[in-house]
Image: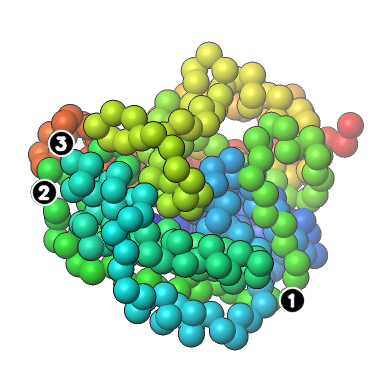
Amino acid sequence: MNYIGSKFKLSSWIKEEISQKVEPKNKIFCDLFAGTGIIGRVFKKDAKQVISNDIEYYAYVLNRNYIGNHKNLKEKMEVIEYLNNLPLRDDGFIFNNYCSPANRLYFSDENGKKIDTIRIEIEKFKDDKDLYYFLLASLIESADKVANTASVYGAFLKKLKKTAQKEMILEPAIYEENENEHLVTQKDANEFIKEIKGDILYLDPPYNSRQYGANYHLLNTIAEYKEFEPKGKTGLRDYYKSPWCQKGKVKRVFEDLIKNADFEWIFMSYNNEGLLKSEYIKDIMSSYGEYYVIKRKYKKFKCKKNKKNLLFPFSEAIHSETIEYLHILHKRKS
């Protein structure tokens, strides 16, 4: 998935830097703002346990599959084939609210119908949690591949782009199998940090004022599949507003989290365009132990204003060079 703030391209570097400071084997590793779970995935086979948390439900679904699932599901490919060949229905929520019947072109009509058809059928597998979240994660990623957007869901394109014209094929969200049990949660990070303890804490909080609940609202709608009244031209839903995206609150929640973290090592990814300045991060972390910082240039996924093919002015996905900082704290025992 093209995902704002994704650490996919930086995952090997981040793992290498963390592993140089502390050996992850037999350690509890927590990814507190997990997003699509890229960093948790690279530590899954090494750590004693991965704790993966994110407040957004679509992220919980992805991580419940990629991190939470660790045993073989023998019937998973048979079910994928079965779901791909269901006769399409036209009474579903996505088709009637996010396709041409609602003048919202997030998906082609056929793909909207297929998303509804598969999502409704997936609910029949809810008693088998491992299979259920595997199927939901597969649907979220497959639907995202044919979405008619500039990568985020704040607006849709006026005309169907080439990838959106393709038939959606439900593809399996294959996870890595291992012997260890992992924990996946959907909680507020600053509250959850008071409930857990471990060895390695990895932080990748939102950097700026763009709320993930708004940018990826349609993924939550597909994942939850509960009826509501979509708002405005874009069909927005009510969404969680993170204090990490609010200039007047981010300093407080950052210091609060560092103070309450019962972890020996804390690693935080944050770039040079974030609401928190590097000097402030250094000052806070240094007051709790030994502080280090490493930086690296890379091309990151971001958004820019562009009117081309959009229903109205919004952000278009681009890549631009930025500096990624990995702030490191070896925390003193209290």
Is 126 placed above or below 172 here? above
Furthest toward the right, the residue is 334
Q: Which mark is residue 311?
A: 3
- Residue type at numbered disc 2: Lys
Q: Position of residue 224 (x, y in %)?
A: 51, 49
Q: Which secondary structure lies at badge 1?
A: loop
- Residue type at numbered disc 1: Glu
Furthest toward the top, the residue is 248
Q: Earlier in the sequence, mark 3 or mark 1?
A: 1
Q: CA distance from mark 3 to mark 1?
A: 48 Å
Question: Label 3 crowding class (10 Å Cα cut-off): few <14, some 14-19, many 20+?
Answer: some
Q: Position of residue 118 (x, y in %)?
A: 41, 66
Furthest toward the front, the residue is 91
Is 127 placed above or below 331 here? below
- Residue type at numbered disc 3: Leu
Would you say residue 55 is visible in this rendering?
yes
User: By what rule are the colours in the image chosen?
Assistant: rainbow
Q: CA distance from mark 2 to mark 1?
A: 47 Å
Q: Which mark is residue 179?
A: 1
Q: Position of residue 198 (x, y in %)?
A: 80, 49
Q: Earlier in the sequence, mark 2 or mark 1?
A: 2
The answer to which of 213 and 26 lies nearer the viewer is 213
* Image quarter hosting the C terminus: top right
The answer to whether residue 190 is left or right of residue 104 is right
* Image quarter hosting the N terminus: bottom left
Q: Residue at x 76, y 28 (%)?
A: 259
The mark closer to the camera, 3 or 1, is: 3
**In which quarter of the view is residue 288 placed?**
top right
Question: Label 1 crowding class (10 Å Cα cut-off): few <14, some 14-19, many 20+?
Answer: few
